[in-house]
Image (cartoon, helix red, strand yellow):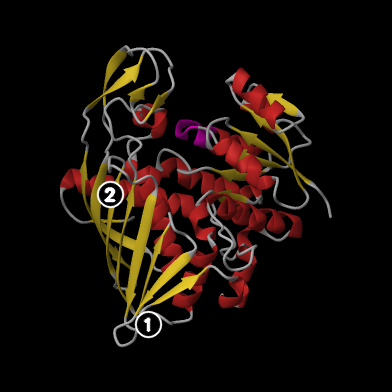
Amino acid sequence: MKTINAAVIGAGFIGPAHIEALRRIDAVEVVAVASNNVEQAENIAEKYALAKAYHTWEDCINDDSIEVIHNCTPNNLHFEINKAVLQRGKHIVSEKPLTMTSRESAELVKLAGAAGVVNAINFNYRFYPLIQHARSLVHKGELGRIYTVHGQYLQDWLYYDTDYNWRLESNISGISRAVADIGSHWCDLIQFITGAKITRVCASLFTVHNTRKKPKTHVATFQGKEADAPMEYDEIPIDTEDGGSILIQFDNGAHGVLTVSQVSAGRKNYEWFEIDGSRKAIHWNQEEPNSLWIGYRDKPNEIVIKDPSLMDAPTRKYAHYPGGHPEGYPDCLKNLFMNVYEFIRSGKNPAEHHKEFPTFEDGHTEIKIVEAILKSNKEKKWIEVS
């Protein structure tokens, strides 16, 4: 089996997560990491025994030995790097959001089609085993007609006004924060499971901390609490949302509602949904991903555990261990990348991926949804997703 060489651009939280997931896939070799933070790049290269540590992303994508680029940089760099990778004719896996605007994402979709390379975006929650099973249930008609979809994506990592991160700066992260960062995952997941598209939204967003305290020097903190000495801060105005609630209409007639928040105490990464159909309902929670609740009107409810022997045949490949052996976040990253690299190795036309993984088209769709939500919040009315 031919080994495929990959490189990761970006040395924050998600870059090493990509490296670790890629190392669990057969015949994939991560040969390089790139970051403009020289110390971080070299530390990651040493930690993972990577052959190369590039100090610019340009040098990385110009390395002819590298076939696939994983773009794990801050949001404001996604468009420029993704575009350059496509122009170099390399396969690309990008973090989300795909770009800062739908104008940029539309351009990338066109470029990807013209380049004829594999393009993927990291909507990794699709690849939990029971998410694949839930999608199979819906598409076989076991839920019947979908009535409603509702859920939340809650976090508390920005709970205090002393919590600070580059995602709070709109020139780096974009004009939406909570919706674009975590709401986009929920919207993609629901559309993937149901096969229905979000067509209209009506949103009410909020910002709890209109100013935040940015440390003048970098000192390790834990949930806003100072590690050692008293801190000195700059007061920074905030122009992105801490959360909000969104009413949703789907193209199949179903109604939905989503609440997102990054200021919900005790909720670390609480993404959950319930899909209510005419025959049964299903419920899933990302913090407990190895069980799927199935609800009935006329008989006892069920809990399906993650067990390959209980799953539909096409979805079993996403569960790598027997029942009773939990699988989690790193495993859904692995599953997504597994599909991408199997597809690259197959030599198939990238336009014929058949939903084996989310593509730049899915990233473009999500940006249009986010923009519609922002417009709805501003104009205080229902907005069509263009």
Span of residues in magenta: 74-80
Is 93 left or right of 166, judged from the image as shown? right
- Residue 149 vs 171, above or below: the answer is below
Say which of 350 and 317 sits in front: 317
- Amino acid, disc 1: Gly
Is 204 left or right of 338, judged from the image as shown? left
Look at the image and tell me whether residue 14 can be seen.
Answer: yes
Q: Work out which quarter of the rendered image holds the C terminus and state it.
A: bottom left
Neighbour class for label 1 at 10 Å: few (<14), some, many (≥20)?
some
Q: Which residue is mark 1?
A: 144
Distance between mark 2 and mark 1 Cα atoms: 29 Å
Q: Is residue 97 magenta?
A: no
Q: Which mark is residue 373?
A: 2
Say which of 162 and 243 sits in front: 162
Q: Quadrant of residue 89?
A: top right
Q: Quadrant of residue 303?
A: bottom left
Q: Find numbered disc 1 in the image and state the secondary structure of the residue it sits on.
A: loop
Is 308 left or right of 248, judged from the image as shown? right
Is 215 left or right of 113, judged from the image as shown? left
Name the residue located 30 percent from the left edge and 49 percent from the top edge.
Answer: 260
Q: Find numbered disc 2 in the image and state the secondary structure of the residue it sits on.
A: helix
Q: How far across and how far down the image is residue 109, in percent?
A: 53, 49
Name the residue located 26 percent from the left edge and 27 percent from the top edge.
Answer: 161
Q: How far across and how far down the image is residue 266, in percent?
A: 32, 44
| Number of marks | 2
Q: Earlier in the sequence, mark 2 or mark 1?
A: 1
Q: Quadrant of residue 148?
A: bottom left
Neighbour class for label 2 at 10 Å: few (<14), some, many (≥20)?
many
